[in-house]
Structure formats: C-alpha cells, structure tokens
Image (spheres, helix red, strand yellow):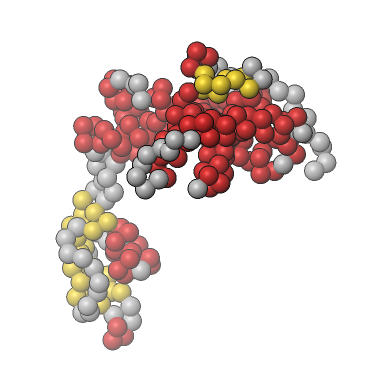
Amino acid sequence: MSRPWVLAGGMLVGAALAVFYIVRIPETPEPTTADAVAWVNDRPVFRSSYENALQAVAGDRKDGRLREDDRDRVLQRLIDQELLIDRAIELGLHERDPQIRNQLATAMIDFLVRRAEDEARAADEAELRTFYEEQRFRFQRSPQYRLAVQGAAVPLPEGFLLAKEIEQGLGPSAARTVIALEIGGSATIGKGSGSYTVQLLERRDGVVVPFDEARDAVEAAYLRDRSEETVREFLEVAREHTDIRVEAER
C-alpha cells in the first residue's frame, strides 16, 4: 500500500516543489509559514500538502479511513521528499536528467495555466461579452443540409445533417459534391448499377449562437485563450531577461 502511494504522491509533490525551488516561479504567492507542519532546512512543509496527502491515502482505503500511524508516516514521507529533492538539486539532476527536465517544464506550464485560469474565472459578464463580440466566428453553428437520395439505399440519417455526417455516409468526394449543390440541384454519385442520385433540398447556413446560449463555450474559450497568452508572455519575458546564445552551426 505505502509504496504505490509514495511513488504517485512523490511525483506530484516533488514536481511542484522542484518547480518552485529550481525554476523560481516569478510573482508566486507564498502560503503563510504559520501553516507549516514541519520544516526542512528552514523550508516549510505546508499543511495543505500534508492534508492532500492524507486524503490520498484515505481514498485508497476501502473504508476511506486513516489508520492510527498514517499521519506520522505521511509526514515522514513528505520530509523524505524534501531531503531527496535537496540532494537531487545538489547533484544537478534537474540540469542533466531529460525526464526531470521534461517534468519540470510540464509542471511549470501547468502552474501558469492554473494561475491564469483562476484569474480568468474572475472575469465579469462584460468582459466575457466583449470577448464574445471579438471572437464571434468561434461560436458559429456549422451549416446543415437536408438531402433526398434516389436509386440506392444509402446510410444517411433523416433530417438536417452536418457536413461530417454526410461525409461519413457518402464518402469525402461525394460529400463535397453534394454540399456544393444549389438548393434543388442534384448529383449522380457512382457509376453503373451502383450509382444513385442525391438532391439538396434545403440548407441552413451557419449562424452565430447567441451569447446566453453559448456562454459556457465562451467562458471555456476565454479561459483557454488567457492560459495560452500567459504562457507566451512568460516565455517572452524570460527570453528578454535571459542570456541566450545560439551557435551559428547546428
């Protein structure tokens, strides 16, 4: 029981701590040290990390309850992690090990994304509506088509269909031909005894979904855009304040 938790919990907690102490995240709000449950080389082990680890252990149990020695054992494992991270930094593993470097880069991106999403969720209705107006093309319904098929049994659902549904039933080439038809126009698909005729009866052009109906999609797109923007801005600032030299011959 303890070993799987140590491995899984160690990766999560270790990645977060390593990002903080190795990468030195800019403008990171530090939890109050009064909330520490232990100290390792003057560095706090925060109660939030401790409580999260306890919840993970309890969640792994069938009865969902902690055992008598779990609290001390979990705390000792968190202290062990701090000691291991310290030694890993001393050995320069974060500089040499490709796997650790990739995990750090991923953890840093995740941190920036979470922080950006937290800030973006505080956006008021006016900000979301402004974003919606600027990005209206992203909230447009796809065109729909109603067809009539003659001469063969074709696996097309009834009613209005999206282009991808027509493509699934007729194939990409035939779908492009049918979608390009004028209303009332028809096209013969295939050759010989296997041919059939498809007529375009009606088309519903794509329209922009009203804000109130698209609000959830607008908020999701807003969060995603702000997250991507935050990562780009971080990298731009980091490049400006970092000595980067690229060899001419590569």
Picture residue at 30% right of the left edge, 20% below the top: 124
* Residue 34 x/y as whole percent: 50, 13
Q: Nearer the viewer, residue 184 or 19?
A: 19
- Which quarter of the image is occupied by the C terminus? top right
Quadrant of res 178: bottom left
Picture residue at 20% right of the left edge, 72% below the top: 149
Quadrant of res 224: top left
**Is residue 23 visible in the rendered structure shown here?**
no
Q: State left or right for residue 28 relative to residue 130.
A: right
Picture residue at 36% right of the left edge, 42% below the top: 64
Residue that protrudes farthest toward the bottom in the picture: 193
The correct choice, above or below, for 9 with respect to 200 in the image is above
* Residue 133 x/y as whole percent: 31, 28
Q: Nearer the viewer, residue 46 or 212?
A: 46
Q: Nearer the viewer, residue 214 or 65?
A: 65
Picture residue at 28% right of the left edge, 35% below the top: 216
**Is residue 62 visible in the rendered structure shown here?**
yes
The correct choice, above or below, for 222 with respect to 119 in the image is below
* Residue 85 x/y as whole percent: 66, 32
* Residue 174 x/y as whole percent: 34, 68
The correct choice, above or below, for 164 with respect to 194 in the image is above
